[in-house]
Structures are given as structure tokens and as C-alpha cells.
Image: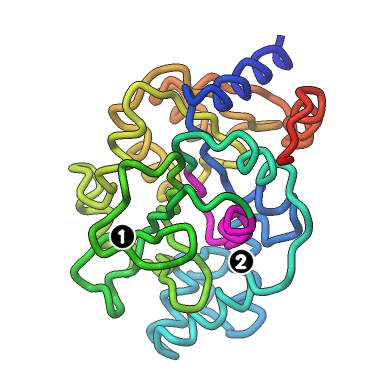
Amino acid sequence: MTREMLRVALEAVAKGRVVPYLGPEVAALGGAIASPAALCAEIESQVRVPKRAHGNLWAAAQFVETRKFRATVEKMVIGAFSAPTGPNPIHDWIAATRPPMVVDAWYDPALVKRLRAGSPDWGLVQGVSRNGEWAEIWHRSYAADGTPRPEGADPAWPMLLYMPHGLALPGHSFLVSDSDYVEVLTEIDIQSPIPDEVRNRRTGRGFLFLGCRFDDQLLRTYARQIAKRSGEGHVAVIEGELTRMERLFLEEIGIERIDLPLAAVVEELKALDVSAG
């Protein structure tokens, strides 16, 4: 039954009825850093943080930003995602099926690079830190070739990639420290930081959460607000024991959980003979 539910959800993505929402574990399929904790460990390998910030990505990044300036944090995060990654079957699936919208809730640039190697008829909108040069805006949009679009996302794009936490590439921006999220979290309930075109494209569609955990309040808040006023039929592939807060969150949003590893998604994609051609 769980396999059949997974198959139905994947087919719904291919038909444009469900939005894939990708978490850090998807990036790990290609060899990228797999979790906020792992990225925090990378930061802590370079800077000794106080005990209160140990293991907490947002607090550790804030400590480095306060003591060693924003540029140091950006260099660390971009460096953490700069190593070449391998093929990623879920990224290949996205490139092949080209759903109307994809949410990538991680900093990894691999999906952007994968899409840029293919068709040019898509666009990117990403969250930005208001602590830097873009203090008056919540997000920036780019055409497929990386050209900025000050006018925002194009409604005519066949596919929109939305990266709410930003993108770890030189010349781009991302939210990672506590101070990055302060303004966003005060405004996100009234949807100000959510781009208009994201709001348009989520209407009437459910979400398929892949490679996500919801054991962090900030990550739950983002998922809740991005899925707000969307359609029904949300599904999350999460293996193993859930925390109490994760269980409550899934119930609150109306997410049906499939207790399978992400590897089962990859196997199912092979069974569906999904190819990027």
C-alpha cells in the first residue's frame, strides 16, 4: 500500500498536480551536505562556537557573523557546497518531468546546475538575506541562464524553482543566521516573504515532501507557510521514528506520511522508467 501511495504521488507530480518539496536529504543523493546539523558541523570545524550554539546551525552562523562578519559566514557556506557532486536521480526526475513548480528547501546549487544544463524554459526565485545588499527585498528572481529579473518571476515560465532559504553560489544570497530569519519569521504568517508567483502556483496543488525532516521549528514554519492556501493531498516520505512535534505538524497540515527511505523513491522512479532523455 505504501508503494502504491508513493507511485500515485510521483505520477501526480509528473502531471503537474503536486509540487515536489525537496529537503537536504535529496541533495545528499548527489553527495552534498545532508542536513542542517552536518552544515553546522562544517562551520564548527573552522570556528569554535559557544556551547549554547553547538549543533544549532542558525545560532552557530549567528555567532560567526557577529564575531567575524557576514562575509566569513558566506565564505564558509559557499565553500561547504563547492565540492563537485555526482548524479542525483531525483534532480534528473525533476529535469525530465518539469513540474510547474519545485521547492528546494536547501542551499545546495546542484539542482540549479542540473536545470541549466538542460532546457532554458524555467526560472528561479530565491530568498535573500536582508542583512546584506538586498535589505529592502525578500527574494530575487533569475532567468534560466542566471540573468537577474528585477521585475520578478515570469508567470509564463513552464517551471519555477523556488529556493526559500537561498542559494549557496557566489553572487547569490541565502538565509542562515538567526538574524537572517528574524524579519522573515515576523512577516511570513501574512505571506509577505512568499513570492506572488509561488502563491499562484501552489493554488489547488498538494505537496510531496522528499528528504525533509520537521524536527526543527524554523523548518516547520517555512513548510507550513509555503504550503498555506494550497490544495489537498500532501504526502511526505519520511522513514523511521518521528518526534512528537513532527507528528503534530503532519496532523496539522494534513500530510500523509509514507514510512519509506528515500532510496525507495529512487527505486520507484526506476520502475516508472523516468529518464531525463
Q: Residue at position x 73%, y 27% from top?
A: 260
Relative placement, left or right, of 238 versus 177 is: right
- As shown in the figure, which amino acid type bears the numbered disc 2? Leu
Asked where in the image residue 273 lies, by quadrant, the reply is top right
Q: Residue at position x 45%, y 69% from top?
A: 59
Quarter of the image that includes the N terminus: top right
Rendering coords of residue 79 (x, y %)? 62, 78
Residue 171 or 215: which is nearer the viewer?
171
Please, which colouring scheme is shown?
rainbow
Q: Which residue is mark 2?
A: 39
Rendering coords of residue 61 (x, y %)? 47, 74
Rendering coords of residue 187 (x, y %)? 20, 51
**Mark 1 to mark 2 CA distance (whole Å):** 23 Å
Asked where in the image residue 172 lies, by quadrant, the reply is bottom left
Q: Residue at position x 61%, y 61% from top?
A: 113
User: Regarding mark 2 in the picture, which secondary structure is present there?
Assistant: helix
Q: Residue at position x 61%, y 77% from top?
A: 44
Q: Which residues are magenta?
A: 103-117
Q: Which residue is mark 1?
A: 139
